[in-house]
Amino acid sequence: MPDPAPQPYALVVGDDGLARPIWASRDPLMRAYYDDEWGMPIRDEQGLFERLSLEAFQSGLSWATILRKRPAFRAAFAGFVPERVAAFDDADVARLMADAGIVRNRRKIDATIANARATVALREDGGLVDLVWSFRPDATPEPATMADVPTVSAESKALAKELRRRGFSFVGPTTMFALMEAVGIVDTHLVGSHRRGSSGVWPT
């Protein structure tokens, strides 16, 4: 009798014996991202600016699409060095809009440049890293299935509001919750996943 099909919200045990959510169990690129990157703390400005930018570009698209294009994004946006992106001009915007390797969305491109400038400006007031990490909650979710994973929180709403006040855009509460998951501020690895608690930020 064949094994039953995996449930869409459940953990899947891979051929290596490790349990992952179904979204991280099929595509080798997504599996590597889940195993090595997703949910690990990012506490440097350049790394955090890159993740914030890519989460904004992901809005309305799949993360797999963004991940496959990440090398092209890094090349197009000067490695996501904030001061370099902040100096982009109309010629750079035209170049980016002609670059088939990235997501050619004018509003998102403009937002990334504006967010770079806002990131540089934040250096005078603690910096992007301290601001984003200051919204770490007192507790993290403990989801048993993907259906239990929230998509927004009080903290992500507050972070989105504060970033908009600081001149950022494309930083809505859902996008900011995804950022918080990606950089370890919250741990939404499913209970039972081999990655649960791996960030060191939260106990297992």
Image (tube, rainbow, N blue to C red):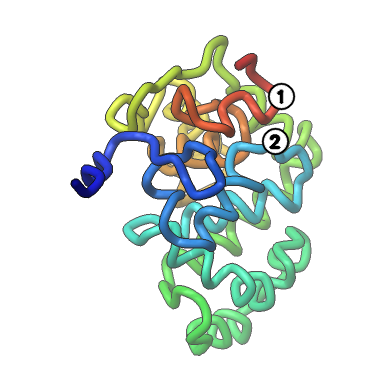
Which residue corresponds to the image point at 73% horizontal and 30% vertical from the top-left?
130
| Location of the C terminus (image quadrant) | top right
User: Label 2 is placed on what type of residue?
Assistant: Pro
Q: Is residue 105 above or below residue 187?
A: below
Which residue corresponds to the image point at 73% horizontal and 72% vertical from the top-left?
78
Q: Is residue 74 above or below residue 201?
A: below
Q: Name the residue beneath numbered marker 2.
A: 41
| Residue 69 position within the rendered picture, expressed as x and y whole percent measured from the top left | 53, 72
Which residue corresponds to the image point at 36% horizontal and 28% vertical from the top-left?
149
| Residue 9 position within the rendered picture, expressed as x and y whole percent measured from the top left | 29, 36
Is label 1 in a helix, a strand or a loop? loop
Front-most of residues 33 and 91: 33
Q: Name the residue beneath numbered marker 1.
A: 200
Seen in the image, is 61 located left or right of residue 204? left
Furthest residue to the top? 138
Furthest residue to the front? 1
Front-most of residues 164 and 175: 175
Which residue corresponds to the image point at 68% horizontal and 30% vertical from the top-left?
199
Front-most of residues 70 and 36: 36
| Label 1 crowd (10 A; few <14 / some 14-19 / many >=20) | few
Seen in the image, is 165 located left or right of residue 82? left
Q: Along the polypeptide, which appears first: circle 1 or circle 2? A: 2
User: Label 1 is placed on what type of residue?
Assistant: Gly
Seen in the image, is 38 located left or right of residue 25? right
The number of numbered discs placed on residues in the rendered structure image is 2
Whether residues under marks 1 and 2 lie with C-beta atoms below 8 angstroms apart, the answer is yes
